[in-house]
Amino acid sequence: MFSSRFAKYLLSLPCKSAVRRRFSSQAVAEKVTDGFVEDLRNVVGKANVSTAEAVRDQHGHDESYHPTKMPDVVVFAQSVDHVSKVVKLCNDTGVPLIPFGSGTGLEGGINALKGGVCLDVSQMTNIVNVNAEDFDCTVESGVTRNALNSFIRDTGLWFPVDPGADASLCGMCSTSASGTNAVRYGTMRENVLNMEVVLANGNVIWTAGEGKRTKKTSAGYNLTNLFVGSEGTLGIITKATIRLYGIPESTVAAVVHFNNVQEAVDTTVQVLQCGIPMARIEFLDDVAIDAFNKYSKYDMKVKPSLFLEFHGSEAALEEQIQVVGSKPYSTDVCVPISHLPEVIVKSKEMIKNAGLTGPIVGHVGDGNFHVFFPVDPDKPEQLKAIKDVSRKMCLLAMDLNGTCTGEHGIGMGKNELLVKEVGPAGIEAMMCIKKAFDPNNILNPGKVFA
Amino acid sequence: MFSSRFAKYLLSLPCKSAVRRRFSSQAVAEKVTDGFVEDLRNVVGKANVSTAEAVRDQHGHDESYHPTKMPDVVVFAQSVDHVSKVVKLCNDTGVPLIPFGSGTGLEGGINALKGGVCLDVSQMTNIVNVNAEDFDCTVESGVTRNALNSFIRDTGLWFPVDPGADASLCGMCSTSASGTNAVRYGTMRENVLNMEVVLANGNVIWTAGEGKRTKKTSAGYNLTNLFVGSEGTLGIITKATIRLYGIPESTVAAVVHFNNVQEAVDTTVQVLQCGIPMARIEFLDDVAIDAFNKYSKYDMKVKPSLFLEFHGSEAALEEQIQVVGSKPYSTDVCVPISHLPEVIVKSKEMIKNAGLTGPIVGHVGDGNFHVFFPVDPDKPEQLKAIKDVSRKMCLLAMDLNGTCTGEHGIGMGKNELLVKEVGPAGIEAMMCIKKAFDPNNILNPGKVFA
């Protein structure tokens, strides 16, 4: 661990003031007075503010195993005007604000580490426009990908980025989500054209200019891709204009079994090199196939396998683990594909040596894979061992030109790994941006940066 | 025009100090003393510093028609260490620094508006690595796309982004370049995995962490896409890790003629909707076909036409105009394709009404098109009329969900249009980033922001 070095390092940074500003839960709770809650009610209406414990508890955690904290109050925004006024109120009062979409994140991004206001934007569910001829649409913050795809089905179009969960599209912008078919369609980074964002001072901006929805632009700094993946720490995403694609007329699925990981990856490279436009190239290791067989009463060969254009493999596995135990703990490293065999083989060793078990599912076209560890809530030492293996996998990936997170984000789980990944000057550059956009550090404090 | 309103607006911004800091040429010239030049020589070696007028003149303009200004001194960097030390020297002294790649820009991005140091990085021509198995490579700042493609030809890979000119790849990162086949491969934004950047204080960062070259990442703020398109105003790009693609085994080219623009665009939409992976969909209007016929001794129907997978149409036209007159003046608007017929029809009217002529070439798959106006250097009133039409086209495009620049950037030519395009709060957000990264405003001052 490098916690103390990390703290010492933070203290040495010029932009440290923005990020070092600490909230104690006590201090925040004192600011969330009856008067403050009354102010919130005046802004958004009485029915849209809740301090009920059940509501706060529900908004205090996502699907990860990070320690949870409840917000002091939950606000249900019904409009961008609500969002702007609530953010401004929090900024003026110094109360932390955590945006909440669908709560399906995997790195504790919506945990209210120091209490404060949880701003739930899931009720803003307008589909603002669908421009079928231009292959784009604009949605509000509460529209989920399944809701959008149902709504536009008759147009012959769909939004293909698929992280498994039925996440909100603006939440997917916030965490830079991707999923099984990024090899064909890219991640959120490649599929967002414009966003409406509320800044810490309450200003409302469109990252590419209001109403703009061109496929490309060279006009000024790329604010769009600065906010994509910023995890609620630079502003609140209230609308997104995203690309749409023609629904493929037909899909072909194939399963190929291999003797080892290297063979599977070699095949992937060759497929990509031929320029065959694959939608999905998913890798499942022998443990994953075995689990799949048992759950689905299949009899597939228990060997490392590639699923080409196979739909739903990851979701099916997650579901299976959830049925047999609890929600799984998912790792998320990503490396150049040439290093994938080494990382997978060594990960399997680490998993075995730690006395753990967990199927491996990989979006191998991207070099990204997950281990889904089943978690027994009654065994804290098991969770500790899982976290330890997960961290070692990240360090291994980072040594091999890779990243600690291909698609889940940093949240509260990987702050220290981020410092190691981008280095002192890189983290300083990120902190300077944070300071420029959120000088009072009210937006999702404790996420991305510790 | 809205110059005075623009100036007034700038004065109202909180981050104005960074961008309002003005350099007078006189004040800068006084800072570029013999001692300062001697310091530069000590850093990079005597042979790599020039104050010769011919060298300065050559580095004072790109291929645009914007008024030119020479730098006071030209430095030829041979390493990132050179770049870091020269940037630090300029930052400490308050001397403007303008990075120079291949000088092929179209919006005056490398003009030395107030003099200062031109930092020529074109001699850093190492291809650092080629990872054929991972479809990526890393190049230094002086490597051009043709040089790279020649070097890697035997691997079966190529880098497809093609802006026409043989630009340096890091320069293409800097201006967020694209070109004829972005519809298939995307622009620089989608094709840069990582960059080494020297910041204003001399710090060297890798935007995605040193050595990282994964196809995707969710690790922290997307610094990579913040620096792509920042036009030398936030830092100096010294290395880029970019995606490579398999060379297509065969290409099919077709030309289809239409009675009007609407029909051509309708066809484009249908082609895209079918999901056919087109490499290039280039539109040429009747004027462009006529010019092409005369230049190439062809006899194509003089009608609006689509060139599918057609290679070199834009470059050929540019070349033709250069042969008959001088370098052309190129416009660069981009709109959602549904608005393309209206913008093209109205642009043709504007061109005609202004007594001008100019062929239209469009990357219609992206909604981006150019008018190539031939310029007679002896007729200043003609250049004025061209600029006027170009500006009106930008305003029209911006009214129709479009942008004033699809791929050439803002440079010094479109600062005011950028303000209109992203709005007051948007420009303020961009200025806050500028201030965070370049508090002394030494990096390419006067570009992007007026």
Image (cartoon, coloured by chain):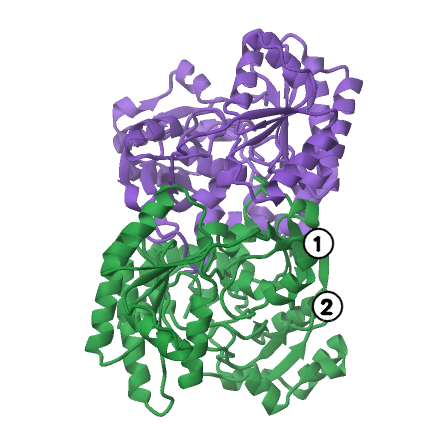
Chain colours: A purple, B green
Give the Cα separation between the discs numbered 1 and 2.
19 Å
Pick the front one: B407 or B201: B407
Image coordinates of residue A438 in percent, x first then y, are: 47, 46
Image coordinates of residue A239 in percent, x first then y, are: 34, 40
Which residue is depicted at the point 25% across and 28% down? A45
Q: Is residue A200 shown left or right of residue B44?
A: left
Q: Is residue A287 above or below residue B431?
A: above
Q: Is residue B219 above or below residue A301?
A: below
Q: Secondary structure at mark 1?
A: strand
Check the image and name the residue furthest to the front.
B299
Residue topped by disc 2: B79
Q: Secondary structure at mark 2?
A: loop
Pick the front one: B158 or B65: B158
Q: Amino acid at mark 2?
A: Ser
- Near mark 1 (Cα within 10 A), the count class, few <14, some 14-19 or many ≥20, is many
Pick the front one: A257 or A294: A257
Residue topped by disc 1: B130
Residue B387: mark in rendering: none
Which residue is depicted at the point 63% across and 30% down? A369
Q: Chain of mark 1?
A: B
Q: Nearer the viewer, mark 1 or mark 2?
A: 1
Q: Amino acid at mark 1?
A: Val
Q: Is residue A410 shown left or right of residue A118?
A: right
